[in-house]
Image (cartoon, grey):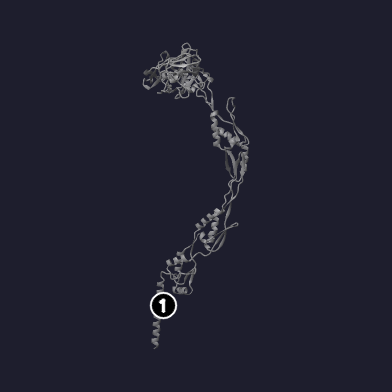
Amino acid sequence: MQKITTGFLILLTIVSLFLLLGTLAGYELAHADRIYPGVWVNGLDVGGLTREEATALIEEEIVEEDVTITLRWLDKTWTARPSDLGMRLDAAATAEAAYRVGRDASFAPLTHLRLLVEGDRLSPTFRYDAAATRTYLEALSEQIDLPAVDAKLSFDGLTPVVTSSQNGRELDVEASLAILEEVVPRFAPAEVELIVREVRPNVVDADTAREEAEWLLSAPFTFTLPNPAPDDPGPWSLPPDQLKAMLALETEGESVHVRVNEDALRGFLEELAPTIARQPVDARFRFDDATGTLTPIEPGRTGRALDIPASLTRTLNALDEGQHTVTLALETLQPRYPDTATAEELGIKDLIVEGESYFIGSPSGRDHNIRLAASKFDGLVIGPGETFSFNEHLGEVTAEMGYDESYVTAGEQLAIEVGGGICQVSTTAFRAAFWGGYPITERWYHHHRVGYYELMEAGVGMDATVYSPQVDFKFRNDREAPLLIETDIEESAHRLVFRFYSTDDGRRVEKSGPEITEETEPAEPIYQLDNDLAPGSVIQWQSAVNGLTATVGRTVYTAEDEVLFRDSFVSRYAPRRAAYHYGPGYEPPQEQPTEEESEPAVEEEPTTP
């Protein structure tokens, strides 16, 4: 009986042990992927839940505790929650921590039993993002920061006015962040004093600039020429209001200073430069055929130009030294051909060509004008490659310059104007350039044929008219040596001569033509009343001349008899009607048209190679 009882107890024990082990195994199996019972998170029972279920429940049920962090600066405060400063609930990490409870114990059944009896309460897991704290502080800085104010100089009219500097402030984001990085992760109420630093302005002194401006604007600034001649321009003054517009502010250290803007001052000097400039004047010469030497007939004169960089430096130095006057710097310009130049140096040794025309029978006014205009070209030196302009060297044609009135071609009738006869001179220059083989770049023919230019078998189409500034005569010195122009008048023959001296390169010229085409006869005469004539009288004012087109060809050969170039000169002359002026009481032929009924004149046309 005792043996049976003992055996039964052993069996019962074994069975109980197997049942217990089975129960434990079943418990473990049931919670293999679930949180053990007895685990709580912030009062929330998550036991028996999977991690995913616990994560969802934590996100839904757990909210941030009523924790605030107070930020303070002086008497201002800002209240922020941890979430405002980068604290975020990590539900998944919290669920994972709950799941790990009881799984790492050495004897799990006792741990599980303890959980069932006592339970285990966990705090939620939070993550801290310092970047969010920085963003919060940067936004807060907009309410705290105050920019520093630099000292400034302004003007009330010509009076300089100073605005004082003011210190600023700014939230030191990095220093304040370092404090909050220690406080926020504690997830507990706290009070933090923000770090705010004073900002000093870059410019604290404008009084110096005010004193400088007051001195600069106290008087005009004057520019003078060195050793000015009586007819020299200047002096020039910059009045204070104009000088003020040139002032600029420059910062040096913590002070602002007033300076004159160099670009503005340079612009002022550049405007003065043309007024001050004097072009050098080349000497004029005569060539002695017997000795082959040059004799100056007019000395050369130096010119001058404003040296802008040096004048700018002088002006700035004068201002720095407290002066209100400066002497401008000038550059001396030497003539290309001084009166000391020799024929050998210039290569002027040969008579290249003579151009001629005749003005026999010219009225006294025309005769005078021819002589005066011709003198403008006597002794001129034209450099290699340069283009000769008749109008440039002729200058102004006015009574003040000594010219008389005489006949000029104007429309259908000759008119009387100052300078009549100058075209005799341009025609002669044209003929010299033509026969000298020089390239002619501009030549204009007359509206009507002029008898003076066909004297001594000169032929039609060998004239050149000028009328400054639109109508000019030009040719280019294409030789390697300068060209010397001499003008002479042979009194007995009333012959005007242009002589060209240079180095002869052996070229020669052949003329063809003139070829006459499109010849037309003039219309009926013009009769015009002149109340200054005697009653019943009539005089012939001008004779009739046929119109035609004349084409003159030119071939220029080299010394080797090769063609250098060919060109032609076309002149389209309009017919000119005879004209009569009559006094009161004279009855002109009725069948003749009056001047008012005539066709308008055609302007001269240019002809160039």
Residue 208 location (% of width, % of height): 62, 42
- Taking depth in this image into account, of 94 and 530 the one nearest to the observer is 530
Secondary structure type for disc 1: helix
Tell me: residue 115, above or below residue 249.
below
**Crowding near the residue tagged with mark 1, few <14, some 14–19, many ≥20 C-alpha atoms within 10 Å:** few
Residue 411 location (% of width, % of height): 45, 20
The residue drawn where x is 46% and y is 68% is: 98
The quadrant of the rendering that contains the C terminus is top left
Q: Which residue does the numbered mark 1 point to in the structure image?
A: 20
* Total marks in image: 1
- Taking depth in this image into account, of 280 and 549 the one nearest to the observer is 549
Tell me: residue 200, above or below residue 192.
above
Q: Is residue 197 visible?
A: yes
Type of amino acid at the residue the image marks with label 1: Leu
Q: Is residue 307 visible?
A: no
Residue farthest along the top direction in this orientation: 492
The quadrant of the rendering that contains the N terminus is bottom left
- Taking depth in this image into account, of 270 and 345 the one nearest to the observer is 270
- Taking depth in this image into account, of 313 and 494 the one nearest to the observer is 494
Residue 328 location (% of width, % of height): 57, 31
Residue farthest along the bottom direction in this orientation: 1
Residue 416 location (% of width, % of height): 49, 18
